[in-house]
Amino acid sequence: MPAPAISILVPAYGEAGTIEQVLRRAVALGLDCEIIVVDDGSHDTTAAVVQRLADELPQVRLIRHERNRGKGAAVRTAIDASQGDIVLVQDADLEYDPRDIPRLIEPLQSGVADVVYGTRLRGGEPQRAHLFWHYVGNRLLSLLTNVLYNTTISDMEVGYKAFRGDLVRSIHLVSDDFRFEPEITAKILRLPDIRLYEVPISYYGRTFAEGKKITWRDGFLALGALLRFRFSS
């Protein structure tokens, strides 16, 4: 079978309530794609929901981690399993709407970009009001990224990122947790002549009561990761 044009990678941990909507919306786009869900040791019915959909939808494939290892580990597993010319990370919690995927991948399809980041901070797409300290942390981390790597990214921590498949599969990644975001950004920006674009996306953020997992501690870990990967060989 020929490789699909797009690999949609879905790291999932405890997202039984939303993952079916995510997968059905992605399939409804009608793209030539594979959807690789990595269940990261969920204790709810996430894996069972995905397996039921995989039996129904040929695009969907389930990979399971026996224990919870973190978002970065789940994304790395999915990258290794991917075959697409374009690789895109789609969270399982509906904070990011799969209907934005065509907008995100268009610069890659047209050949002008190697990497595309969604941004919640530019453009006029629908935005749920951010948690204030998350907003401040995101802006500070993006500013530090721009200073360290001489770029103009507005939303480094965004979970919606797309890559040329051959490019992302060639990068050695080590982060198991949310440090995946600064690590992949650092290693992308250290490549010569990389073409990174941003496109505005909608954002339907959750509160902690609704299941949001990232905390202020992850912000400090991201800060350390930006410095580490900037100056390590």
Image (cartoon, helix red, strand yellow):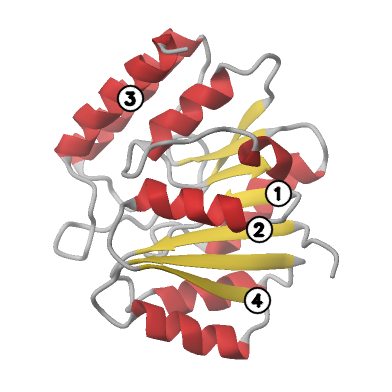
Whole-percent x, y for residue 44 in the image? 25, 79
Question: Does the image show residue 143?
Answer: no
Kind of element beneath mark 2: strand
The foreground one among 2 and 18 is 2
Which amino acid, by three-letter code, is at mark 3?
Ala
Which amino acid, by three-letter code, is at mark 1?
Ile
Of marks 4 and 2, which one's residue comes earlier in the chain? Answer: 2
Dots 3 and 1: beta carbons under 8 Å? no
Which amino acid, by three-letter code, is at mark 2?
Ser
Residue drawn at the location 53% of the way across and 15% of the way down? 151
Residue drawn at the location 15% of the way across and 36% of the way down? 217
- Residue furthest to the right in view is 2
Residue drawn at the location 78% of the way across and 32% of the way down? 112
Of marks 3 and 1, which one's residue comes earlier in the chain? Answer: 1
Of marks 4 and 1, which one's residue comes earlier in the chain? Answer: 4
Dots 2 and 1: beta carbons under 8 Å? yes
Residue 28 badge: 4
Question: Does the image show residue 179?
Answer: yes
| Residue of label 3 | 225
Residue drawn at the location 49% of the way across and 28% of the way down? 185
The foreground one among 58 and 117 is 58
Residue 126, above or below 143: below
| Residue of label 1 | 86
Q: Disc 3 to disc 4, how far (Cα)? A: 37 Å
- Residue furthest to the front in view is 66
Number of labels in the image equals 4
